[in-house]
Image: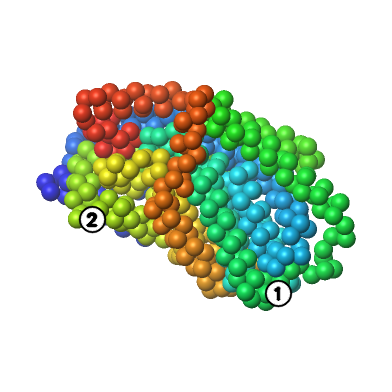
């Protein structure tokens, strides 16, 4: 390593230390990039920061972030989850482990409609927690089912995490959405199978819903299922269906989804101007956090690459005497460990650009890499000491201790690790839908102008024989 590469390594270590002691991530990245960049590169670092910020602002995909966030907050107000929960509770009432199925199915379908984690865990805790306690359900497994089900929202489309990940990896957000369906539904199915299996072997863990709480006839059950499912179906078609069949880009679909959510609130008779204003305020706060972090991490990554440390890390990891799948497992383990102290925005925007060139060097498809990383990042909400899902659930169900919640989350983390291994060993789990739609004539998601520019530039680089990975610090635009 030369002097500049050592300087970049020092910048990375100082950044990790500063974040671990609690300094704000975005400001830490910006100041460290400017200070270390000025020492190593001189005044050119300020021009680099300006150009990187302007380049990021031209990424059309980021426009989808506030729209999908707004859609999630509006769905919370519509009472969509309550409808789904009641419908599934009445439908599966006579079955062992019924409330586990209800929680996980509700979380899965609400994740498709809204994609939020905190609100999903809190609402499920409020609705299902007291009922599970009253019905004698195992507290540990109940807490695990609620927290694990709630985290599906960051993986199953429309996921804000995948929207942010698309420009970072230089791939179509629509492709990431298509690839995320397989692992998302696989995880949901594995969660349900685990809970049902244990309830069947030990009925005390999950008895059926008490007879006195079951509906007296099937007519109201069918009505609740119809009312609960139709809005989700319509909203899903309005957001995801139009992307997959190629009618709109993810940005346009996000706008349609936000409009659909507002119309749904009006149809349910829950629309208020105060509620809309609060949803817009929360959207502004969440979006500002993500986009400011995106801008500062872009500057940090550009300086890190200019110092040469990113290239050195890539070459060092590629030189590890392991087969490609072993090196990929090493990368995923590193991301898994980063998920303990960091939440997904920091990992996607800071660390993923450093690791993506390694996956590209191993000849992994970037859509597949982004998808399996998304599955691993789901553990950021299930692994201590951050484990935000535990604190969300503790707020909603105070009868369960944090120790009980953590133990329940640990059981489901084992299931998630098994799912990661399955996706790594059998890539078709993620890639079957993108491959099928690519082979289908006339079914292709349209490219945004930013994506079209990335594709054209990548083609030029490949024709010239130079490796190119758009959107990462090692790409030509950041050299």
Classify mark 1: helix, strand or loop.
loop
**How crowded is the residue under tag 1: few (<14 C-alpha within 10 Å), some, or many (20+)?**
some
327 left or right, relative to 436: left
Of discs 2 and 1, which sits in the foreground?
2
| Rendered residue at 30%/25% (across/down) | 459
151 left or right, relative to 300: right
Determine the residue located farthest toward the left in the rendered image. 2
Q: Position of residue 105 (x, y in %)?
A: 65, 54
The residue that disc 1 covers is: 136
Above or below 375: residue 445: above
The residue that disc 2 covers is: 322
**How crowded is the residue under tag 2: few (<14 C-alpha within 10 Å), some, or many (20+)?**
few
Residue 367 visible in image: yes
Q: How is the image coloured?
A: rainbow
238 left or right, relative to 58: right
In front of the other: 420 or 345: 420
Above or below 477: residue 330: below
Q: Position of residue 410 (x, y in %)?
A: 49, 68
In front of the other: 160 or 248: 248
In front of the other: 344 or 273: 344
């Amino acid at each position: 390593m030369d002097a500049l590469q050592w300087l970049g390594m020092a910048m990375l270590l100082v950044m990790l230390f500063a974040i671990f002691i609690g300094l704000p991530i975005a400001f830490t990245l910006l100041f460290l990039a400017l200070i270390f960049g000025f020492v190593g590169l001189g005044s050119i670092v300020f021009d680099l920061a300006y150009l990187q910020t302007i380049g990021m602002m031209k990424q059309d995909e980021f426009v989808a972030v506030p729209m999908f966030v707004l859609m999630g907050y509006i769905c919370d107000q519509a009472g969509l989850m309550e409808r789904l929960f009641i419908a599934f509770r009445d439908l599966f009432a006579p079955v062992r482990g019924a409330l586990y199925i209800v929680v996980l199915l509700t979380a899965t379908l609400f994740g498709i409609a809204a994609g939020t984690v905190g609100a999903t865990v809190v609402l499920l805790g409020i609705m299902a927690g007291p009922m599970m306690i009253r019905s004698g359900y195992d507290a540990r497994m109940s807490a695990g089912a609620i927290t694990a089900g709630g985290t599906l929202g960051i993986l199953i489309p429309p996921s804000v995490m995948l929207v942010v990940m698309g420009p970072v990896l230089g791939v179509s957000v629509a492709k990431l959405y298509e690839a995320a369906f397989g692992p998302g539904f696989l995880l949901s199915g594995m969660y349900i199978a685990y809970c049902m299996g244990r309830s069947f072997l030990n009925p005390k863990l999950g008895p059926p819903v008490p007879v006195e709480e079951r509906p007296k006839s099937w007519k109201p059950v069918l009505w609740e299922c119809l009312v609960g499912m139709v809005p989700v179906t319509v909203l899903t078609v309005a957001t995801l269906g139009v992307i997959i069949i190629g009618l709109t880009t993810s940005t346009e679909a996000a706008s349609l989804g936000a409009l659909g959510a507002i119309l749904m609130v009006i149809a349910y008779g829950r629309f208020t101007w105060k509620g809309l204003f609060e949803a817009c305020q929360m959207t502004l706060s969440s979006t500002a956090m993500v986009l400011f972090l995106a801008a500062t991490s872009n500057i940090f990554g550009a300086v890190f690459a200019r110092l040469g440390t990113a290239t050195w890390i890539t070459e060092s990891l590629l030189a590890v005497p392991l087969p490609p799948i072993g090196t990929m497992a090493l990368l995923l383990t590193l991301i898994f460990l980063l998920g303990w102290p960091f939440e997904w925005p920091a990992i996607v925007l800071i660390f993923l650009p450093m690791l993506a060139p390694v996956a590209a060097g191993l000849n992994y498809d970037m859509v597949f890499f982004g998808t399996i990383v998304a599955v691993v990042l789901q553990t950021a909400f299930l692994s201590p000491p951050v484990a935000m899902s535990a604190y969300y659930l503790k707020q909603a169900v105070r009868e369960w201790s944090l120790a009980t919640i953590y133990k329940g989350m640990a059981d489901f983390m084992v299931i998630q690790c098994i799912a990661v291994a399955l996706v790594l060993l059998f890539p078709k789990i993620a890639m079957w839908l993108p491959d099928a739609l690519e082979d289908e004539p006339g079914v292709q998601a349209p490219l945004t102008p930013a994506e079209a520019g990335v594709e054209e530039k990548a083609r030029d680089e490949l024709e010239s024989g130079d490796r190119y990975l758009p959107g990462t610090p090692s790409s030509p635009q950041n050299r």
